[in-house]
Image (cartoon, coloured by chain):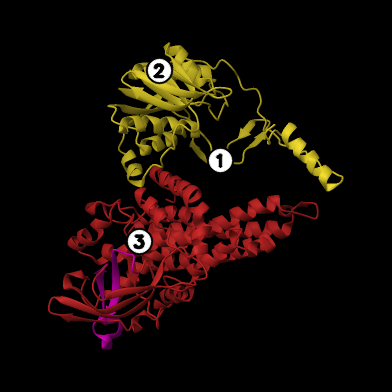
Chain colours: A red, B yellow
Amino acid sequence: MIDFTLTEEQRQIQSLSRQFARDVIAPQAARFDRDESYPEEIVARAAGLGLLNVGIPQAVGGLGLGMLDEVIMGEELAWGCMGIYSVLMASELGITPVLLAGSEEQQERFLGPLVGKPSLAAFALSEPDNGSDAAAMKTRARIDGDEVVITGTKMWITNGGLADFTVVFANLEPEKRHKGVVAVVVEKDTPGLSYQKITGKLGQRAAHTAELIFDEVRVPVSNILGEPGDGFRIAMRTLDRTRIPVAAGAVGVAGRALHESTKYSAERQAFGQPIGNFQAIQFKLANMKIGLETARWQTWYAAWLVDSGKPHTEASAIAKAYASEVAFDAANEAVHVFGGYGYVDEYPVAKLMRDVKLNQIYEGTNEIQRVVIARGLQKA
Amino acid sequence: MKIVAILKQVPDAESRLRASASGVDLDGVTWVMDGMDEYGVEEALRLREGGLDAEVVAVALGPDRYEEALRTALAMGADRAIHIESDEDLDPISQAKVLARVVEDEGAQLVFTGGKQADWDSSALGPAIAEFLGWPHSDWSTQLELAGQQVRVRHDAEVGTEVLQFPLPGVITTQQGLNEPRYPTLPNIMKAKRKELKRLPLGEVEQVEARTEIVSQTLEERERRGRILEGEPAQVAQQLVQLLRDEAGVLAK
């Protein structure tokens, strides 16, 4: 049975997210983009509405929303601003390893306190010298009595330094490569942990991105998720899921690009008529629509697989790579439809292109997604 | 005390409508709760949150899809909902007869509904409900205070405002400015699923027949006048100011 009908609840989630994106996020997006400042008030309002950390299970007081719920919400919020949505999305990314590998006690200890508050989580895997080749990480961990001690530097960490806790991946036994990796929860204000905000980003400038420095950071061994050595697998399983909201965000940006282009091409006159009368523009709009719809269905499909407990590695890789490419193309075409006005920040479309470029890069570059897809094909 | 908030589900203001010989085509329209009715739901919730011991009941008369608007009201915080199901194009007076019956059956003392309904573009619903019930009412209300059984309402008049006072029970129709309706929160959306939503076929509530029939529907076509003023810049500017003031009425006289 194939059924694309949303539940009543999902329609309400969609409508709330849409309203919030249109009324609250979109009107302020340009300011945060220009100032490269963290949208504290918007995040607080989103948290008040329950739009933050939606994956926290009901057992510890959260809403326990499914992946399809999350992507429906994500598409709408990203329509308003991909950068602001990234703050919320990265927090879901931060809680996911705890959901997947944390014990009940750990879920209660780490996730419970986030409920109902504008509190964020973060996920720290990439380093200054390695991203895609995650197993090559240089951050080290050692066990000292009942503590684990972490030293190293993590890079490009969304919510880094602001988050109440960060799941850090470090290597206990570097000679074992990825089999030596451990996933550790490090709480904010732990001595030895510091951060440096990264500025000068091309897009998603409302999202706070940081370099995290771990200098002999000590946390109890009870903060280790799963077993020592499980870390790499936990990271990969996390990303298998959280790439789907990255795709959803891209779909939101594509939708915004189409919305702005349709509106503008109906108003802008050239040669005595609206430019939307010309096939050159009509084809661009139609192509955006084709990309938008197909990317959305792949994203929903991947989310449905997660919610159904089915394997989703390949589907999420396809959704992420495809949606982010489709969205970048749509934003690029939107800039073209707007002509000169597309090239200045007075109009919203230049920002769409700058923002959505990152969806092709973070949470596994689109090249890595293709590696994942190809490996699946050649495994047999 | 029981408060009834009557609501409708109407096309989102941004929806594109098309009209043909068979009427307005509503396919592909995004439906939302009528914005004016939202003020009523919000005001009822605020009264309750302000300490009034009240049950807030959301009531709608209309086709299946109205259920979504009722769910929104439940997610905003209404205690329960009643959906009187009907696919008929009932005129506002016939609707009022049905809704007045529901208010009576519920034993409610205060009724809110929008100052105007976006579907019929009529302001009759609230006053007609008051008429059927024999209750006082205030239309286009922008401020409300409740002290015991006494209601004080500020409402818009042609130029300026009036403050009315009457004892409950009563009907209040709303208007922009009354409040800023809240968003339903996600936790409340989840909780709304467990709240009671009673469905009643129209025939079980009240026997009514539409008193008017819709014969045709067309959409307003807005043509731009596109008037171009010519002459010396100073003259043109003067002419423009005059037109904006006297014809367009956008500048104060």
Instruction: Tell me if I can see residue B59 in this picture.
Output: yes
Span shown in magenta: A161-188
Disc 3 target residue: A92
Give me the chain letter of mark 1.
B
- Residue type at mark 2: give it: Gly
Disc 1 target residue: B29
Q: Is residue A368 left or right of residue A224?
A: right
Q: Which of the 4 image quadrants contains residue A93?
A: bottom left
* Nearest the eye: A116 or B180: B180
| Magenta residue check for B11 | no
The structure residue drawn at horizontal position 61% and vertical position 65%, both measured from the top left corner, is A332
- Residue type at mark 1: give it: Val
Quadrant location of the C terminus of chain A in the rendered image: bottom left
Tell which tag, 2 or 3, sits nearer the viewer.
Answer: 2
Q: Earlier in the sequence, mark 2 or mark 1?
A: 1
| Magenta residue check for A182 | yes
* Nearest the eye: B60 or A1: B60
CA distance for labels 2 and 3 = 48 Å
Q: Where is residue A42 in the image (x, y as percent from the top left)?
A: 42, 54
